[in-house]
Amino acid sequence: METNKVELSGEIAEIRTSERGTNFVMIKQIVNFGGVERTRLFETLINAERKDLIDQIAVGKKVRVFGSLTIFKVKKFNIHKMLVEVDKIEPIE
């Protein structure tokens, strides 16, 4: 297994589309930590050329996504950001 390959599951909370057609999809997970439920959000990216994947996304849909993780520094805000480039999507019933 490659070190930057990831698998995430959750509900699609938001979809934003750039001017070039790239889709930024927020995956929401509800986790229980110390008896307290918390929301975790993961940002994923679907390239405009991947029409097969774009057709599978909708807000509120529960999915499992597979892809490559990239971590980079956003100099403007002096923070590190994680982004998953999606290779495959599976619906969760």
Image (tube, helix red, strand yellow):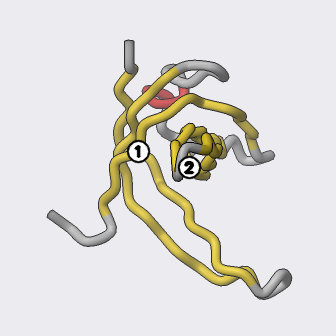
Q: Quadrant of residue 25?
A: top right
Q: Is residue 48 above or below residue 12?
A: below
Residue 65 in percent (x, y) is at 40, 39
Q: Nearer the viewer, residue 34 or 39?
A: 34
Residue 52 in percent (x, y) is at 43, 26
Local secondary structure at mark 1:
strand
Q: Is residue 84 above or below residue 79?
A: above
Residue type marked 2 = Thr
Decide if residue 79 is on the left or right side of residue 46.
right
Q: Nearer the viewer, residue 75 or 29?
A: 29
Residue 8 in percent (x, y) is at 41, 44
Q: Give the farthest residue toward the left.
A: 1
Which quarter of the rendered picture does the N terminus lie within? bottom left
Q: Residue at label 2?
A: 44
Q: CA distance from mark 1 to mark 2?
A: 10 Å
Decide if residue 50 is on the left or right side of residue 79.
left
Q: Is label 1 in contact with label 2 (beta carbons under 8 Å)? A: yes
Marks counted in the figure total: 2
Residue type marked 1 = Leu
Q: Which residue does the image show at 35% across and 45% down from the upper left?
A: 66
Mark linked to residue 8: 1
Q: Quadrant of residue 28?
A: top right
Q: Which residue does the image show at 56% across and 67% down from the upper left?
A: 82
Comparing marks 1 and 2, which lies closer to the viewer? 1
Q: Is residue 64 above or below residue 74?
A: above
Q: Is residue 82 above or below residue 47?
A: below
Query: Which one is earlier in the sequence, the residue at label 1 or at label 2?
Result: 1
Local secondary structure at mark 2:
strand
Q: Which residue does the image show at 61% across and 52% down from the upper left?
A: 43
Q: Which residue does the image show at 46% across and 30% down from the upper left?
A: 53
